[in-house]
Structure formats: C-alpha cells, structure tokens
Amino acid sequence: MGLVPCCLIFALLISATGSADASIHVYDRDPFREVGNAYLLSGGSEGIVASRTAAPLPADNAARSSIDDGRSYIRFDNITFWRSKDAADQHQEMEHSTGLIQVIIFEAVDRDNIGGSPYGGQRSICCTPDLAKLEGCKQGEVIRIPSAININWPIVLNVQFNGNYLSTHMDNKVVYISKTGMYNLFFISCDPTLKGLTMSGKTMWKNPDGYLPGRMAPLMKFYVIMALAYVLLSLIWFSQYVRYWKDILQLQHCITAVIALGLFETTLWYFEYAHFNNTGTRPLGITTWVVTVGALRRTLSRLLILCVSMGYGVVRPTLGGLTIKVLLLGVTYFLASELLNITEYVGTINDVAGRARVFLVLPDALLDAFLILWIFTSLSRTLDQLQAKRSSVKLDIYRKFSNVLAVTVIASVAWIGFEVYFKATDPFNERWQGAWMINAFWDILAYVLLCAICYLWAPSQSSQRYAYSDEMGDESDDDEAQSLCKGSPKGDISLVKQDRKEKNGESADVSDLEDEMEEDKRE
C-alpha cells in the first residue's frame, strides 16, 4: 500500500468520524411466544443517549413528517399485528375492541415496574383478579407501576383489534428519549384468545448522531485509532522490509501478512460501523468480509506465534512432520472463530448478546487453551536447544519472547476474569457504556504482541546469515553476537569461520539434521 493512498483513506476516516448510538429493527411476521400468562414479543434492547435538544412529550408524537437532529427516539413505522382466523371468527364484524395489544417501553432500571406478584410467588406480567384487588391494576392488561423519576414512564401504547378483522395497524408514533439508559421494547398481549399472534413492520432507534447501538458507538472511533496504529507499524516495518528485502526470512513474510490483515480488518470495521450508523442496518457483505478477515488474522497470528516458538526460520529450516498438524489446527481454529463471529456480528443490531454465542465460545476457548499449551511446550524445547548450542544471542531473543508471551497470557487470564465478573454482575446490561472495552482490549493486546514480535524479529542484513545455522563454541558465538547486535556489513571473519565449519563439520550438520527429524517424528 502506497503512502499517498494510505493517507487519503485515513483522512477520509478521520473526517467521517462521529458518535452514534442506535439502529433499525425489522419484524417480518415474527411470532409472539407464551410467557407466563402473557403473549410476548421482544422488539429490541439498546443503550440510548439522551437527546441534546428539548423534546416534546410523548403525547405530541402521533404525526411527524421529519425528525430534527439532536434528538433520541424510538419510532414505530408500519407496525401490523396479525391474529389467527379462529381468533377473529369469535367476534362479530361490528364489534369494537376485540383484542388488546400493548406496546411497553421501559428503562432497565425500571424493570420491576412491569408486572407484579400477588402473594410473593411467581411474577405475573398481566393483571390477574388477585392483583387487581391488591394493586388496583386493570384485569387483562399489563401491570405498570409509574417510575419514581418520571410518572410517564414506563411508556404503554395500546393497539386494538376491531370486529372480526385478521389484522390491525398501529399508528406511526415517536417516543422521545430524555434520559440516557438501556431501553427495552416489548409487544405484549394478555388476551388468551390471541394465541398465535404475529407482527410485521419496523422500529427505528436513533440517538443524536446516528443509528449505531450505544454499546457499539465508541468502537467506531476506536477502530480509527487502531487503523492509524497499524498504519504506523506498517510504515516502520515495510521501511525495514524494503531496505533488507534480500535477507528476508519466511518468518518475516508471515509477520508482514499479519500486519496487512490487521490494517485491512480495522479499516473494514470502521466502514462497517459507519454504514450501520448512517443506515440503521448492518451491511451483510461488509460484515461477513470483516469477520472473515478477522478470523483469518487471528488464526495466522496464533500460528505465527506457534511457529516462532518451534524455532521455525531461526533454529530450524522447516517444521518437518509437524507441518500437517499445524495446518490442521489452523483450519479448525479458523472455522470455529468464523462461526462464532458470524453468529455474534452478522445481522446483529441488539445490545444484548444472543444465547447461541455462549455455546460457540466454548470450542474457540478450548482451541486457544490447546494452542497456549503447545506454544509454551515448543518454546521450552527451543530454549533448551539454544542453550545446549550456546547460542547466546538467539537465546536472549527467545527469552525476551517467552517473557512477552507470559505477560500476555497473564493479562488474558486476568481480563477473562474481569469479563466474567463484568457480565455476571450486569445481567441487564446497565453498564453498556463501558462494554465496548471488553472487545477493544483483545485488539489492543494482539497489537502489542505483534509489535513485540516485529521488534524481536525485525528485518536486518544479518537475518539470512544466521538463520537456523548450527553455532558451536564460544568463538562463533562472539562473531554471531557482533554481527546481530552491531549489524556491521564487514562480516568477513565470521563468514570465513562459517565456511570453515561447513567444510570441516559436514558430518556434524548431517547428524544435527537427523536429530531434528527424529524429534519431529516423536512430536
């Protein structure tokens, strides 16, 4: 990627950056499900930021041709309810109010204001005869207790079936949001004759600056920053890469691929969120591409760390008999990561994670645990080999690499513990404004680890000269240290000594290669 196109792309990214917080929910004959004594359909759950400008009361929102910027709202558009023919046939054509559906909007902190319990037993959504006597609610309707902060909340909108019609339409309404919080929308019917109820239409959840859900809003700016960080890393890496391109190792080609994929992924994430913010819907194509690139980047990153730990390109020329096992593990991890990310991101617009993700996280986590075990086992063996060969420079590099990996694993375990605590203590997503950090941490950690690998295995003029060579003795080790540390082009002495070793120690090299092959077979 050239410098000029790169600058143009990221100038566009910065100029288009803005905050955003909500989305569009589409319903296509979605069925109501039976929950206790009610029929219920979840319309969405999102964090919404309060309007920046004063908004009229909900009663004034019936008809509106345009919506001013700076206002947060939930808008109902072309909502249609359908009941079964059997339910419609129970009524006459001229009857009124032959079935009630109630639209409930409430903030997560007011969740206890919906429903009630007559004698401390199971909570009931709809008013029962006992609750009507105890709490004064109206039998056959949703129990609503006014909020202590605003008596107009929770919002309840009524929609009636008339006569023996199969369907009824809800007026297009707008409910303004004047308080920042996690909001829930439910369509509820307490009428037992409305079993089999379905709904079509859409609701538009919008914050002052766009349609992006509140939990995702900070990520749009975050990925701009991450993309710029990858640009900086790529400029530094590629400058060295071009400068010493004749001495580049296969390992360094892999590092280049990971950097390129990281830059591509963060750029795609930004455009995915920007499209979501502007339109209210997730672009299926871009989202699928970005999760695929992300799965590929994570897979190559893990395989890169595994190969480095095995000494590939530095201690040994090939992986030998382990190549097939490494590739098989890579394919398995890619498929598991791809499936998890597609389930989590493609088409998802709610701020609440689906239940399917809980099951898909397990194979991904098990593969990560297996990779960590294999990486540290291989790294320990590589350190032992370097120590036996008295290769102090490479040994020092690998010790630094092992320290970086150890810190990374400790940080990962600590963050997983924090993530579990965060989600366990926030079942209703009331801390949604800080939830973006959960995902952001892993991207930052991956970037820091990649920077450490780039630093330890940066391209230099001595890369090829000592790649997987067999150094023995203190004298050759001194020459290697001088060449690697100083980077002097005058390496005549070391080259002569290397040639002499190649002529006089050919049998030792063959024996060493046979030992590595036997080790690969054992693994």
Image (cartoon, rainbow, N blue to C red):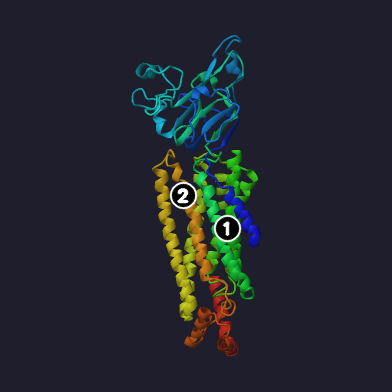
Residue 376 seen in the figure: yes
Residue 286: % across, % down = 63, 47
| Image side of residue 136 versus residue 67, left or right | left
Residue 56: % across, % down = 49, 26
Q: Secondary structure at mark 1?
A: helix
How many numbered discs? Answer: 2
Instruction: Decide: is 314 above or below 300.
Output: below
Residue 347: % across, % down = 59, 41
Residue 391: % across, % down = 49, 80
Instruction: Decide: is 517 above or below 267.
Output: below
Residue at 39% x, 47% y is 421
> Mark 1 sits on what residue?
262
The kind of residue tagged 1 is: Gly
CA gap, disc 1 to disc 2?
18 Å
Q: Secondary structure at mark 2?
A: helix
Q: Which mark is residue 438?
A: 2
Q: Quadrant of residue 297?
A: bottom right
Neighbours of disc 2 within 10 Å: few (<14), some (14-19), many (20+): some
Q: Of 322 and 18, which appears nearest the observer?
A: 18
Q: Of 140 and 290, which appears nearest the observer?
A: 290
